[in-house]
Amino acid sequence: MNEFGLVLLQVDRTFFDYAELVVPALGATLAMVGIVFPITALIGLPLAVVLINTGRNGLFPHKSTHQVLSVVINVGRSIPFLILMAAVIPLSRLIVGTSLGVAGAVVPLTLASIPSFTRLMESSLREVPRDVVEAGFASGGTRWQLIGKVQLPEALPGLVSNTTIGLINILDGTAIAGAVGAGGLGYLALSYGYNRFDGTMMLICVVILVILAQGIQLSGDALAHRLRKD
Amino acid sequence: MPAMVEVDDLVKHYGEGPGRITALAGVSFSIERATITAIVGPSGSGKSTLARCINSLVRPTSGRISIDGADLATHTVENRRRIGTIFQGSSLQRRRTALRNVLLPLEFAGVDRSQARARAQELLDLVGLGGRGGSYPAELSGGQKQRVGIARALALRPSVLLADEATTGLDHANRASVLQLLRDLRAELGLTIILITHEMDVAREIADNALLLAEGSIVERGAIRDLVLQDSLVRDNLFPPRPHLAAPDRHTYRIHYAAREVPLDWVARLSERLPEPLQVLGATVEELKGEAVGYMIVASTAGPAEITRAGGGFGLQIRELGSADE
Ligand SMILES: Nc1ncnc2c1ncn2[C@@H]1O[C@H](COP(=O)(O)OP(=O)(O)O)[C@@H](O)[C@H]1O
Ligand SMILES: [Mg+2]
């Protein structure tokens, strides 16, 4: 059955009818998060390490690098997601071959989530007291050792906490991307729940999104709590 | 043999241009091995900057520092490991246990794992925390954390132990035990210890020598005992002038002495040599590394020349109060 044919199925859907729509949509949402999040983390965390350590009190201060990076991130963060979605269509076509569906949403979602994720990671790294890093330096650590054995492990609980925020932001992003055609729960909620007045569908989608967000939040909090030793 | 620490014309400016701050304005000194030197001075006098130049956290604007003959500018990484630094308060990693905090420098240096663990345990034993290796910093008292910090500073067998305000913020008992530990370490390991502090009594309790910094320059230096028994700024900091009462027609004096160098009955004997007995307005005796050192504030009809002559043979340091420099 195709997306357009479904218009006819509006009346008296059974549980199975809903499941038939919701399950693939959930799959699409999870796929988007599952692709976008690792890429975002893999780029955002190192960027945050560079950002903090090129800063004034960092391990390798470098004013111009720091400023350029900072400006690029701020610009990235201030572009509204919907506009970014439209603006990167050519880029999406180039990278993933399409600007439609899950694949098409991955490029703009990743681009949109990296800047804010970087700032989230940066703020956690900033919480490591300067004394602790300096003590590591005075203990004879090289810069790489200080990043790997002092900065990152000390910041870990905060990094985990803020990663949950980043993940939920990405989940939000998939709903918006869905609204403009990427599929997933956001698409379902809007196209059926909103445009076709199917309150049940709207409710199901919202409940699943809330459960996902809550699940991420609670497990992130629990993990961060377990990692914290003070 | 060169001195353990040699600092030659060290200058540090922060910033550039007209607004730059001169934190060190050409400081030179040397420190002999196995001594404890206190670097004292008011807040902002450049003590921390000096410490941070010595442990390579700050690059001096000019000047030279050498440790055991090796120039700090040339072998930076290796020389960083020659200096153990104890930081103020808690510089421990909160997510590492006490043992793993002590392990950190050994991990950095690539020491074999089991050897490193044995060494870290040995160091915890040395600082009296052998049983607390598994505790996280949050589970330790301020004094215990500071001991872990000391163990970490010793991990790579440094020849110099540098402490910037290591006892600041500790309560009296904890401070006393940390100072005792430092004394023991000097005795057992022959460490050269540099203590940076604004607490003069820390210097009094533990140091052999003192350097007094003011506005980025050394204004006094020497053995603490000599400084205390001389007319010195260090002494005035250790024994601040106190308010006093005396009849208007009398001179008031502050008399400093080392108990073992003066006759027990010096007050009576000095009084005998004066037209009238001394009137004692106040007195204090402090222990300076096991020796009683004190001062007395007295009033007398005798003028400065007369009382100095009378007290001359007793080894007293007499200074008139209320004179221009008080
Ligand atoms: N990183 C810095 N940047 C600019 N000025 C500094 C910095 N560190 C210290 N100073 C200034 O240098 C002077 C000496 O400071 P410091 O060495 O911390 O003295 P102390 O430890 O004796 O209090 C002060 O005027 C202080 O404000
Ligand atoms: Mg200071």
Image (tube, coloured by chain):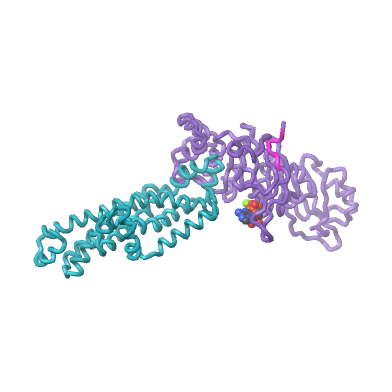
Q: Is B65 colored magenta in this rendering? A: no
Left or right of A112 on screen, residue B200: right
> Between A196 and B78, which is closer to the camera in this rendering?
A196
Q: Residue at 86% across / 49% down in the picture?
A: B271
> Which segment did they paint magenta?
B2-7
Give the position of the N terminus of chain B as an image quadrant: top right
Q: Residue at 52% across / 41% down in the picture?
A: A142
Q: Is B4 colored magenta in this rendering? A: yes
Give the position of the C terminus of chain B as an image quadrant: bottom right
Q: Is residue B79 above or below residue A85?
A: above
> Between A107 and B144, which is closer to the camera in this rendering?
A107
- Give the x, y percent position of residue B186: 63, 35
- Which chain does the cyan colour mark? A
Left or right of A48 on screen, residue A194: left
- Give the x, y percent position of residue B219: 75, 50
Residue B43 showing in the rendered view: no
Q: Is residue A10 above or below residue A133?
A: below
- Give the x, y percent position of residue B121: 49, 33
Left or right of B64 on screen, residue A48: left
> Between B156 and B61, which is closer to the camera in this rendering?
B61
Q: Residue at 83% across / 47% down in the picture?
A: B268
> Between A211 and B260, which is closer to the camera in this rendering?
A211
- Give the x, y percent position of residue B290: 69, 39
Q: What is the number of callouts on the image?
A: 0
Residue B305 showing in the rendered view: yes
- Which chain does the purple colour mark? B
